[in-house]
Amino acid sequence: MLTSHELFGFMSPALASGILEKAYETDRDTYRATMAAVADSKKLRPQFFERMPRATRHTDMIAMLAKPRLELAAANLIRNWLMKHKKDMLTDFLDALGIAHKEGAVDDLPPTMSDEKLKAAVDKLLSKYVPEEVAVYLNAFDSMNEIQWKNLDVMLKEDPRLQFGG
């Protein structure tokens, strides 16, 4: 399982940039909070950082979001991207597992999940969605929930379809 800042370190620059662009276009509050956290971490005033060309700013933001001290900002950005733009993937996964949810959000996860159900759900996601996005989602799902399933941890470490840079 990778933490959110580690996900930004391993995901492709295109996906990381795409996540920032989606926030910029559709979720200004999250984008501004992320930008402010990065600016503060770089000891810059947010206004100065905001005046930078967006492509340059995003390159800096992605590099900083890969650092442990920006775990909270990275987690919020990924969580919002998943909930607002990848809801179909979330609901497909939870439906395949038979877990009750409200538009991809879960109140109570079962303490364990059978290997068969988990493998079938992951296979479904990988057949329908971009593998790198599936890997981001499953790592985020695993790290952001109080309950972690050991078989999902193993799958994330060993399944070559869920590895970054492949």
Image: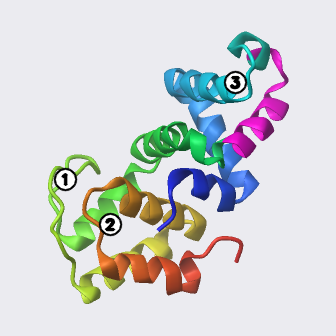
- For disc 3, the marked residue is 39
Q: Which residues are magenta?
A: 50-64
Cβ atoms at labels 2 and 3 below 8 Å apart: no
Q: Earlier in the sequence, mark 1 or mark 3?
A: 3
Across and down, in percent, residue 56 comes to 84, 33
- Residue mark closest to the camera, 1 vs 3: 3
Left or right of 165 in this view: 95: left
Mark 1 residue type: His
**The image quarter in which residue 164 lies:** bottom right
Left or right for 61, reference 103: right
Q: Is residue 131 above or below residue 53?
A: below
Task: Assign the C terminus to one quadrant of the image.
Answer: bottom right
Report whether 114 appears left or right of 67. left
Q: Nearer the viewer, mark 2 or mark 3?
A: 3
Q: Residue at x 74, y 45 (%)?
A: 63
Main SS class of the magenta portion in the image: helix
State the image coordinates of residue 71 (x, y, percent, origin top left): 53, 44
Q: Amino acid at mark 3?
A: Ala
Residue 61 x %, y %: 71, 36
Q: Tag 2's secondary structure?
A: helix
Q: Callout 1: 10 Å neighbours few (<14), some, many (20+)?
A: some
According to the picture, the residue beneath numbered tag 2 turns out to be 93
Residue drawn 26% across and 48% down? Answer: 105
Q: Residue at x 32, y 66 (%)?
A: 93
- The CA span between labels 1 and 3 is 36 Å
Q: Which mark is residue 48?
A: none
Q: Magenta stretch containing residue 107, yes or no?
A: no
Compute the Cα span from label 2 to label 3: 35 Å
Cα distance, mark 2 to mark 1? 11 Å
Of callouts 2 and 1, the N-terminal one: 2
- Residue 54 lies, in percent from the top left, at 79, 27
Structural crowding at the residue carrying mark 2, measured as other residues with C-alpha within 10 Å and reported as few (<14), some (14–19) or many (≥20):
many
